[in-house]
Image (cartoon, grey):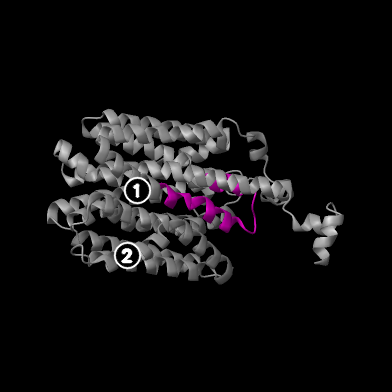
Amino acid sequence: MAGNAGCASNPVGADCAAAMPSPNRRFAYSLVALCFLLAAVSRGLLDSFGAFVLPLGDAFGWERSEITLIYGCGMLAVGMSGPLVGLLHDRFGPGWTMAAGAAASGCGMFLAAIGSVPWHYQLGLGLLCGFGTAAMGAVTQAAMLSRWFRADLNSALAISYSGNGIGPMLSLPLAQALILALGFRPAFGALATMALVPLVILAFLPWRRIRSGDPSLAETQASAGNGMTLSQALRDSVFWSLVWSFCLTSVGIYALTPQVVAFLIERGYPPLAAASAYGLAAMLVPVGMIGVGRLSDRGGRRLAVSVSYGLSIGGAALLSRVTDTGDDLLVGAFILCFGLTMGSRGPVISTLVARRFAGSNLGRIYGSITIGMGAGGALGAWSGGMLFDLTGGYGAIFVLSISAMAAGYVPFLWLTREPE
């Protein structure tokens, strides 16, 4: 009470100044909110693809592997664009890089609205939306926020990356509703307008101040100097451990996720209910990301990552047991386990990268690491579709998903072997 009374009588006193966030901290928090929005839009556009798997097959008569290859191209573009995004960020700054990503995503969705052959969708939903997701995503956000946060960087990244869950949570049911009401082409066109939101916001931000970072961290950043070069990072065992973990985990996740909606529909669930179920799983991503981030800060990265992988693998195993609409409990358990851990490793990886490779080449190094994620995502999405075509079912897909996630966990045991 005394402290509050003192603040009321002397609002500029030292105690009150310590109790209130500084202007720089408030500005830093606003950047986290910006990154959250960009992640939600970019990932929402890319992951709305799950609602279009069956409509594209019905409209064009394509094999499932042809359709999932479209999403695979998107994931490959997300990863392969990483070095380019890092280079653009390091040379032109986050503003131009993110704006280019928003424009690419919008163009990609518009091309999908008028497409008629597979390469139209591979270019639009795959390459353009994939680049857009990368440009507005982890590489740019980690490089930008690391200039404004230090001790709490893991939590800041967890909050910003949680937009990756909110985006699909909103876009998948929205896309499914638009498809049912208007058809798949107008649905693509409507989603393309979502890319205008970040473009308008990005045009009016103070990018010079954003690039300069928090002055209180300037000394720490200066002491890092240029840090490792990309060629030095390529000779670092941590770099390759992160690449392989990214790759294997992405194989496991993306062999399954593009087909979850189709799987539930073929088990008897109405299309909108199936899309909403996946949307509910995505809704839990923010909770899981922030929770894993906090667990990492308090209990250590090894514990946080172990819990995360365990729940992801358990969620996939539970979904594999669903046979009809009477298995709502299994679907609910999948939503809880898988939703809480989708993407939850991302902030932990970003923090490891930002601290291991701090310096002026961070963007390029992190971008190169994400090649593993893109390659794994592309391989997983294509392999999942191919396994469906070969077997006519989903059993082999679940085996691949669970095995790859378990293999992706192994490098983390080595990465987190030392006390933090």
Badge 2: residue crowd in 10 Å (few <14, some 14–19, many ≥20): some
Badges 1 and 2: C-beta atoms under 8 Å apart? no
The answer to whether residue 321 is left or right of residue 216 is: left
Helix, strand or loop status at disc 2: helix
Q: Tag 2 or tag 1, which sits nearer the N-term?
A: 2
The answer to whether residue 126 is left or right of residue 225 is: left
Q: Quadrant of residue 280?
A: bottom left
- In this view of the protein, can residue 265 be seen by the observer? yes
Helix, strand or loop status at disc 1: helix
Q: Which residue is mark 2?
A: 332
Q: Nearer the viewer, residue 144 or 14?
A: 14
The segment highlighted magenta reads 141-167
Residue beneath the point at 26% across and 32% down: 185
Q: Position of residue 331 (x, y in %)?
A: 29, 64
Q: Which residue is mark 1?
A: 375
- In the rendered picture of this protein, how many numbered marks are placed on residues? 2
Query: Relative to 306, does residue 348 appear above or below in the rendering?
Result: above
Dominant secondary structure, magenta: helix
Residue 407, magenta (yes or no): no
Q: Position of residue 242 (x, y in %)?
A: 45, 57
The answer to whether residue 175 is left or right of residue 300 is: left
